[in-house]
Amino acid sequence: MVITIARKEFAEIMRDGRFRWTAALMVLLLLTSILAGWQRFAAYTAVQSTAQGESNSQWLKQGDKNPHSAAHYGNYAFKPLGPLAFFDSGITSYAGTTVFMEAHKQNFAIGRPASDTSAVARFGELNGAMILQVLLPLLIIFLGFTAFAGEREDGTLRQVLSMGVSRTSLLWGKATGLAAAVLLVVVPCLVAGGIFLAATGLQTVGGGVTLRVALLAVAYLLYAGIFLFLTLAVSAWARTARTALMIMVGFWAFTAFIMPKAATEISRVEYPVPAFGTFMAEMKAHQTRGIDGVSPYAKLGRYQAELFRKYQVSRVEDLPVYWTALRMQKLEEIDQPVFDLHYGQVRDLYLAQQRLQDRLGILAPTLPLRSVSMGLAGTSLIEHNKFTTDAEDFRHNMVFKMNDYLSKAAVDLNGVNDATNYMVANEEVFAIVPPYRYEPPALAATMAVQAGNFGILGAWLIAAVALAWQATRRMSMERS
């Protein structure tokens, strides 16, 4: 019986002019968004790869100079994107794509494509994720709001039920027919997306592409199922089809537009991030007074005394290591806890904002789906934090290698206070720092973060099914 009802529902949807128009518009937007996303991804990947290669080459070819000066010359880390970034660009355009790595400084990511676009463009990039998150629910609503209410108004609902069709069979039959019509629109577009995905070569960062795609499909199916059963529930409950449409369009606007913006503002108020100027001033003051209240210069004095005791000498000139290099490396190590504390606090605040927005997903299913989609596409805050943290580790290692080489190679310069107190190194020395290479977080780490959001989506679907079942069981057969 369920199959029979599903076939009837599917056939009626196919004959409905609304389906042809909405399906055509949906296909057009999906294919356009996928093509636009793929073009952006291809262009970004080409620029990122070229820029990273050039930066690594410039590090080696920077010219003969003192190793510590080479550390000040620095290098750039350009964030690579995974192949699924063409489907969901996430926060890539807003969080920065490049980190400059230099001695004595930790820097925020720069290079935000959104800052070079218009206000309208910043409203939201056209990509497959945005289309599915915003317009797929609308397609479901337009196709399903008359499922029960329309038949009640036409008087056919009483006839169907009088034939002995159970209300449960009617619910599942209509759900199956409506789902088949939606899949008929979405699946060909996703196949086209798969073709574009294959065109990326799949050799870029972000392993487990097949599993990531499968998990993305599960998340979006949960999301579509939520709107499908909510639409059927409201259609069964509402006295008229017009009322059902107004209620569902209102809910769609609330979850797709109002709640994402409201959640962002609420999280900003709850976990405010300091302004850049305030952040830098506080960190600089903390560097000056020391992480533990002991000034860096006092610590340097103690360090020098320890070296004298270790090597049983009383003058810098007698040290078997180059004191200036050790001093600069010690300053790096003194500043590092201050960097970690202040930059870590900012990262923690942004993570707290994200967690609060995810928890608000109990009010709007778009919020947890958005996080899952960005996480699996490798364009979420988790991946950005991994990128900046790895860049800082690289910077620390780069500076250490240069200072360490200098401390051993320039011993004879201890105590020399004229123009000859300067060691020059070449490309062979700079090559002890390996080229920068970014490794994205493993899929297991991403799933550990997104498990809660999958749970919220699952809870929404269960609630929607229960609501639809209750509404169908109690729905009136009388016309209003």
Image: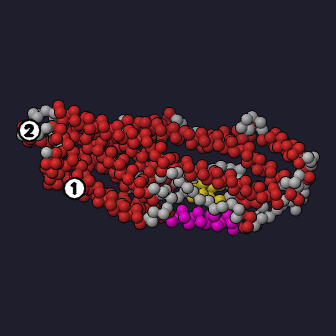
Residue 213 in magenta stretch: no
The picture places residue 113, in percent across and down from the top left corner, at 50, 56
Dot 1: within a 10 Å radius of its alpha carbon, few (fewer than 14), some, or many (20 or more) residues? Answer: few
Residue 478 location, x and y as percent? 9, 33
Q: Earlier in the sequence, mark 2 or mark 1?
A: 1
Give the answer, above or below, for where 337 lies relative to 209. above
Q: Amino acid at mark 2?
A: Gly
In this picture, which residue range is highlighted in magenta? 46-62
Q: Which quadrant does the N terminus fall into?
A: top left
Query: Which mark is nearer the camera, 2 or 1?
Result: 2
207 horizontally vs 432: left or right:
left
Q: Which residue is pictured at 52% across the width and 35% down the height? A: 271
Which residue, given by chain and number where applicable, does mark 2 sit on?
A: 164
The picture quadrant where one finds residue 225 is top left
- Judging from the image, what secondary structure is the residue with disc 2 in? loop
Residue at x-position 76% and y-position 50%: 329
Instruction: Please indicate, yes or no, whether residue 285 appears anywhere in the rendered image.
Output: no
Q: Which residue is nearer to you in this view: 144 or 176? A: 176
Q: Main secondary structure of the magenta part?
A: helix
Residue 325 is situated, as x and y percent measured from the top left of the image, at 80, 53
- The furthest residue to the right: 314
Could you tell me which residue is drawn at 32 percent across and 42 percent down?
Answer: 253
Q: Is residue 432 visible?
A: yes
Note whether 167 is above or below 405 in the view shown. above
Residue 21, label in figure? 1
Residue 365: % across, % down: 36, 41
